[in-house]
Image (cartoon, rainbow, N blue to C red):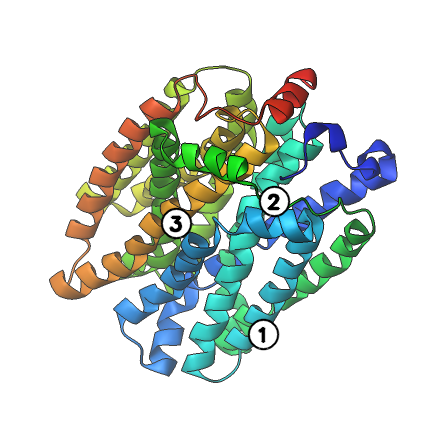
Amino acid sequence: MIPAQDAVNSRVQTRTGLSLLILGIVLIAANLRAPLTAVGPIIGEIRGETGISNTWAGMMTTLPLLAFALLSPLSPRIARRQGMEHTLFAGLIVLLAGILLRSVSSVTALFAGTALIGVAIAISNVLVPALIKREFPNNVGTMTGIYSVSMNLCAAIASGVSIPISQGLGLGWRGALGSWALLAIVSVAAWLPMLRSRQRPQAVQTSADAKKSDSLWRSPLAWQITLFMGLQSLFFYVNISWFPAILQDRGMSAVSAGWMISIMQFASLPATFFMPILAGRRSDQRGLAVGVASLFLVGYLGLLVTDTAWLVPLWVVLVGVGAGSGFGLAVMFFALRTKSVRQSAEMSGMAQSFGYLLAAVGPTLFGFIHDATGGWTLPLILLLIAAVGLLLAGLKAGKYGYVAASDSKEAAAAKGNH
């Protein structure tokens, strides 16, 4: 099984080992969104050179999400056989290969590299929250906040620098996307020490273990967490894919629209850090879920009903804060609604599998509806409806409880650590 609390890796017992582990987590997190958010601001440039439609442009975001959906349930199983540290390292190597492949001069390579990036991110998306629960059982909220801030900070930077790299430095969209290989290389190097202090791979799953996993899929609470995860992810990926186009259609320059997306993501950072801490300090998170949904509702409604230029940053910031707090709360549900590390990984895999499958529909559907209607009104109305769904799911997921019975030994170990 994913390592129990009584087998905490000895590396965290030293200051150097702890610092290296935190650095490794921060760098992995930095790679989880930046390669995707770098695309939105230069999507027009990519379309202009390659000739792809809005629907196919949406697929550049949808492909990674489909990879998340297909591979998320498999990540815990791979980690049990290969070890969590080695599995995360392999994910970084695949990510680097995908970034490089996506940057060569071929539409086929563009989409193939994008798919590889999705495969790599799917692995870390699932395993890092479980790694945090395993190694930092008494500081899950703080470490989740650090992990989330690193992810969103680099995502914001990626949105803002894509056009300056592409047009300002004259490297084109391939150079803008390929530049993120440098971060992947640094992350690979930083994760190497973790391989020397890895935990042993776990035994092959028994029939009893399988029954425990199956019970998770029959839990109504687990499905509410999955829906909450999926809808907040849908909002994020629609935002980074199409907000630049929406803002440019309303008269904003490409550079300004790109930086507006960066502002949205920078606005999310405080909420991304503090939401996991707030959630970890209370047993019931329904009030927090209501706050998250309200931010999305007000932000999307503002974009729908007014074209006033000076109000646009306000709506963008509200959506950004909603995205940051929504992600932080969703990830915390994996720890707060489970009793063991193994179950946390299984919950993460389930939520990200079906959740990202739901999110994958968003960018492509958004682009298709825009192509069909020639405007953004209907797509924004659908986002408002989805925000109501997020509210309902959050009211269920935020209520105190656990998704299913967990392994007694792990639960006992977890209890002893709290």
Q: Amino acid at mark 2?
A: Ser
**Where in the figure is residue 396, as x and y percent of width and height?**
33, 23
Q: Is residue 410 shown left or right of residue 338?
A: right
Residue named by callout 2: 150
Closer mark to the observer between disc 1 and disc 2? 1
Q: Is 179 located above or below residue 194 in the figure?
A: below
Would residue 23 be visible to someone looking at this image? Answer: yes
The answer to which of marks 1 and 2 sits earlier in the sequence is 1
Q: Nearer the viewer, residue 40 or 222?
A: 222
Label 3: state its secondary structure: helix
**Mark linked to residue 356:** 3
Q: Is 108 left, or right, of 252 in this rendering?
A: right
Crowdedness of circle 1 by 10 Å Cα count: few (<14), some, many (20+)? many
Q: Amino acid at mark 1?
A: Leu
The CA distance from mark 3 to mark 1 is 24 Å
- The percent position of residue 104, horizontal first and vertical second, equals 53, 81
Residue 166 or residue 276, whichever sits in front: 276
Where's residue 193, x and y in %?
81, 52
Separation (CA) of disc 3 from disc 2: 20 Å
